[in-house]
Amino acid sequence: MSTEFHNNAESFPELMTETELVEFLRLPAVSKSGDYSNVVANLKRMRDLPCIHICRQALYPRESIRRWIAEQTEKENGR
């Protein structure tokens, strides 16, 4: 499986909303769930998906998400 990021990863904002995160992680392509909010909540709770809260709005730092993906990939490949 390739760990390459989007060719346009830099076009995503530094702090992504949940909707932008769903697109960044390509959840519609890999998840059968119609409720991506639930998928994101599970990733936060079970896989420590990084986020910050500003005015009660969860925002996802792009570079932290990229590092998180790399860490998750290392864990998966280390099995």
Image (cartoon, helix red, strand yellow):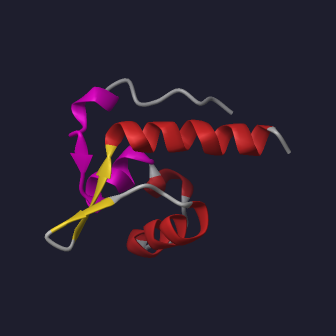
Question: At which x and y percent is residue 32?
Answer: 55, 67
Residue at far left of view: 55
Q: Quadrant of residue 9?
A: top left
Question: At which x and y percent is residue 19?
Answer: 28, 59
Answer with left or right where residue 64 lies relative to residue 16.
Answer: right
The residue depicted at 63 percent of the width and 29 percent of the height is: 2
Q: Is residue 22 magenta?
A: yes
Magenta region, residue range: 9-25
Question: At which x and y percent is residue 5?
Answer: 46, 30
Closer to the camera in the image, 17 or 53? 53
Answer with left or right where residue 10 lies relative to residue 50.
Answer: left
Q: Quadrant of the image for the C terminus?
A: top right
The residue depicted at 50 percent of the width and 37 percent of the height is: 67
Query: Looking at the image, how many numbered discs can be counted on the residues?
Result: 0
Q: Is residue 4 above or below residue 42?
A: above
Answer with left or right where residue 74 lies relative to residue 27.
Answer: right
Q: Is residue 8 magenta?
A: no
The residue depicted at 28 percent of the width and 52 percent of the height is: 20
Q: Quadrant of the image for the N terminus?
A: top right
Q: Is residue 61 above or below residue 47?
A: above
The residue depicted at 21 percent of the width and 40 percent of the height is: 13
Question: At which x and y percent is residue 41?
Answer: 45, 72
